[in-house]
Amino acid sequence: MEGTIFGFTEAQITEFGMTFGVGGLMLLMLFIVGHLAWESKAGKFGAFVLFLGLTFGLVGYVAKYFIQNALGI
């Protein structure tokens, strides 16, 4: 069990954190942007612009995950 933490290797912990940990933070960010749009009474177009501008980076991260699975990396 040398080189492990609670029976998990460093690679397993990193993979878990990068999928579920970052995924959870992405969901939290969506809720924060939604709350910001709600509190500012932005309307439909304003909320769309907020979501588009503030969460555009999430699209790249999700696309990277799907591309890696499709290529088997």
Image (tube, helix red, strand yellow):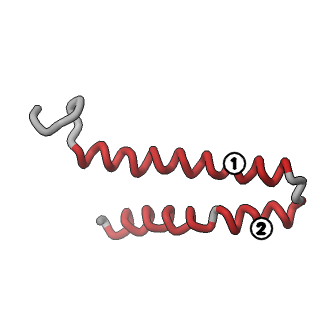
Of callouts 1 and 2, the N-terminal one: 1
In the image, what residue type sits under mark 1? Ile
Position of residue 22 relative to residue 5, above or below, is: below
Position of residue 61 relative to residue 41, above or below, is: below
Q: Residue at x 36, y 45 (%)?
A: 16
- The quarter of the picture where the C terminus appears is bottom left
Position of residue 61 relative to residue 27, above or below, is: below
Percent of width and height locating residue 24: 53, 45
Instruction: Measure how far apart labels 1 and 2 are at the Cα level.
Output: 14 Å
Residue 69 horizontal side relative to residue 43, left or right: left
Residue with the mark numbered 2 = 49
Percent of width and height locating residue 21: 45, 45
Q: Residue at x 11, y 32 (%)?
A: 1
Residue 65 horizontal side relative to residue 46, left or right: left
Q: Residue at x 45, y 45 (%)?
A: 20
Q: Residues within 10 Å of mark 2 (few under 14, many from 20)?
A: some
Residue with the mark numbered 1 = 32
Percent of width and height locating residue 43: 89, 59
Element type at mark 2: helix
Position of residue 15 relative to residue 8, above or below, is: below
